[in-house]
Amino acid sequence: MFGLLRRTPEERAQDDAKIQASLAKTRQSFLGRISAIFQANEVTDDTWDELEELLIQADLGVNTALKVVERLKQCVKKDNLKRLTDVRGALKQELEQTLAHPTPTSVDDARLLTVVLIVGVNGSGKTTTIAKLAQYYKRRGRKVVLAAADTFRAAAIDQLKIWGERVGVDVIAQAPGADPGAVVYDAIRACQESRRADLLIIDTAGRLHTKYNLMKELEKVRGVCARQVHNAPHEVLLVLDATTGQNAISQAKHFKDSVQVTGLVMTKLDSTAKGGIVFAIEQELGIPVRFVGTGEKPDDFAEFDARAFVRGILG
């Protein structure tokens, strides 16, 4: 069994700072307009219409934006809020509550071997995310092994090996074109026997969620995990590129249906002014965000925190 090191208050503060820094573009485009909306002496119907429009433009989605504004209107009326700071504070609370219902991650549960399956489309930052995740758990006392089950591209295998060397973890791989299920089988056996690892993170081919056959193959990889390790995979993390906006919801729906996604890793938040997509996915699909990528370096990675995220948007 492993002895997992919990985050210290200092580490939590560092993660919060990373999240807020990564949302600079969203904050700059969002905060000024929020302030302008509430500059008037009184709140009118136009005020709420403008706020709805702003939330939709920030990629919260129509349904989520309408729900947030309706709850905020009720709060403002009930508490007779007048000042901009008070209304903004109420908006923060509403947005935090939108994200405040994540299920606990099972990666931290005590077991001999935990298996995490990483899925996502090409270009989402999946391989880099795997390296960051490996380093994150290695620093918390885990013995991590990576499985290169993206066998369609030789470059993908090589890239994972390079990242494995950078963060100091073993990579189990076969030749390009090998059966991904066979790679996963070998990786599980290696963890249980020669490597004595307690955390296996599996890379999969970056595939379009609209490709039926490729999604079915991903389901087969999931099946190999289930047959070899009790209740595996214990987490299925979908890597989503925040810059894709509303298209990320469509991706998440397809992956959730095929491989029972349990959590999200949002990448490239620092490259978009529309970080609100996180709220839309949480509300429409009920999939919690586990981590966020905050840059390109291995350390540019943070455990998701709803309060820090909202502060990053609203200041």
Image (cartoon, rainbow, N blue to C red):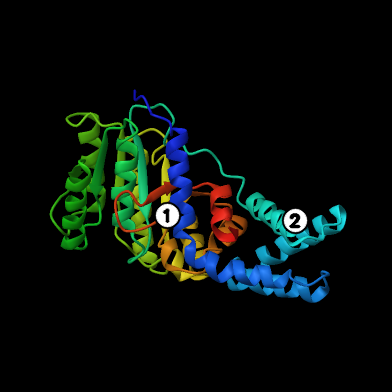
Q: Is residue 246 placed above or below 95 in the rendered structure?
A: below
Q: Is residue 5 left or right of residue 128?
A: right
Residue 142 or residue 175, whichever sits in front: 142
Q: Nearer the viewer, residue 19 or 268?
A: 19
Q: Which amino acid does label 1 sit on?
A: Leu
Q: Residues within 10 Å of mark 1 (few under 14, many from 20)?
A: many
Residue 204, picture quadrant: bottom left
Label 1 vs 2, first from the N-terminus? 2
Which dot marks residue 284? none
Residue 169 in percent (x, y) is at 21, 40
Identify which residue, 78 or 183, lies in the foreground.
78
- Please tell me whether mark 1 sits on a helix, a strand or a loop: strand
What residue is at 44 percent from the left and 30 percent from the top? 109
Query: Above or below — where is 311 with respect to 194?
Result: below
Instruction: Name the residue that disc number 1 marks.
Output: 238
Disc 2 marks which residue? 86
Q: Which callout, 1 or 2, points to the residue nearer the camera?
A: 2
Picture quadrant of residue 269: bottom left
Identify the residue shown where x is 71% and y is 72%. Answer: 37
Q: Is residue 208 above or below residue 101?
A: below
Residue 231 at least partly seen: yes
